[in-house]
Amino acid sequence: MVSEGAPYCADTRALEAMRPGVAMLSAAHRYQDSITVKHQDRTAELAVAIGVRLGLSPSRTEVLRLAAIVHDIGKIGVPADILRKPGTLSEPEYAIVKTHCAIGHDVLQHLQAPFPVAEITLQHHERLDGSGYPRGLSGESILLEARILCVADVFDAMTSNRSYRAGFPADFVLGELQAMGGRLLDADAVDACRHYILTEPIVRPDTFDSVTASQSVG
């Protein structure tokens, strides 16, 4: 179980006021990139399940959900030909993709909410060992909500079909997550993710049974 430890925990009115803005961004993004928005929706569902399992309060869980459903909003600033490239990205192309965290942070800051939704979005590609981006944060300097979102994001990205590869089977991905737990990913969040995936039926019509390994830019 986690401690509350967040100044926004009881501000339910501010949370309610923020929901329409986040919904509007998600709806607008859907017209530009429905594939990414569907990924965000699935990631949000999984992130919420992980958060509940870890004992987040309802308000912190809602902040996590709001961040998750727009965590890739920054991809509006990434050229579509890069996002949908059928092959492996070049280093310059991957560098452009990595800017989506900062772009998303800039967009979400305009919501002017008293919650770290923009910061969670900014941190969702950070890794425990400091090898992530954009700031190279490590350990508990990464917000718990961002660590949870990271696990959910990796799971959905790896199990989903992409333009450059088919999705990996869920059991394979769970094994990969466990291998990364405690080193790259939050171990408790990985365990909570595994529990949810193994106990809740998940229908993934866009995932194949067998795939070839490739690069993920989730």
Image (cartoon, rainbow, N blue to C red):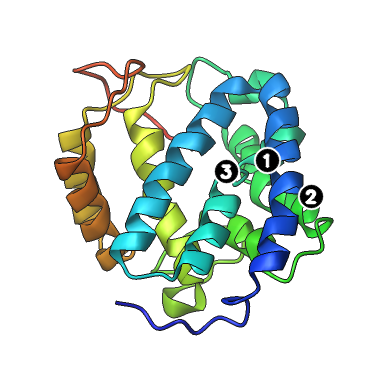
The amino acid at mark 2 is: Val
In 3D space, how far apart are the residues under numbered discs 1 and 3 (Cα atoms)?
9 Å
Total numbered circles: 3
Task: Name the residue carrying label 3.
Answer: 69
Residue 33 in the image: x percent, y percent?
Answer: 65, 23
Residue, x 67% and y 18% (percent of image)? 81
Residue 205 in the image: x percent, y percent?
Answer: 32, 15
Residues tagged 1 and 3 counted as in contact (Cβ below 8 A): no
Task: Name the residue carrying label 2.
Answer: 107
Residue 2 in the image: x percent, y percent?
Answer: 35, 78
Q: Specify the quadrant that holds the N terminus.
A: bottom left
- Label 2, residues with CA under 10 Å away: few <14, some 14-19, many ≥20: few
Q: Which mark is residue 73?
A: 1
In 3D space, how far apart are the residues under numbered discs 2 and 1 (Cα atoms)?
8 Å
Residue, x 47% and y 45% (percent of image)? 44
Left or right: residue 25 versus residue 48 is right
Q: Which mark is residue 42?
A: none
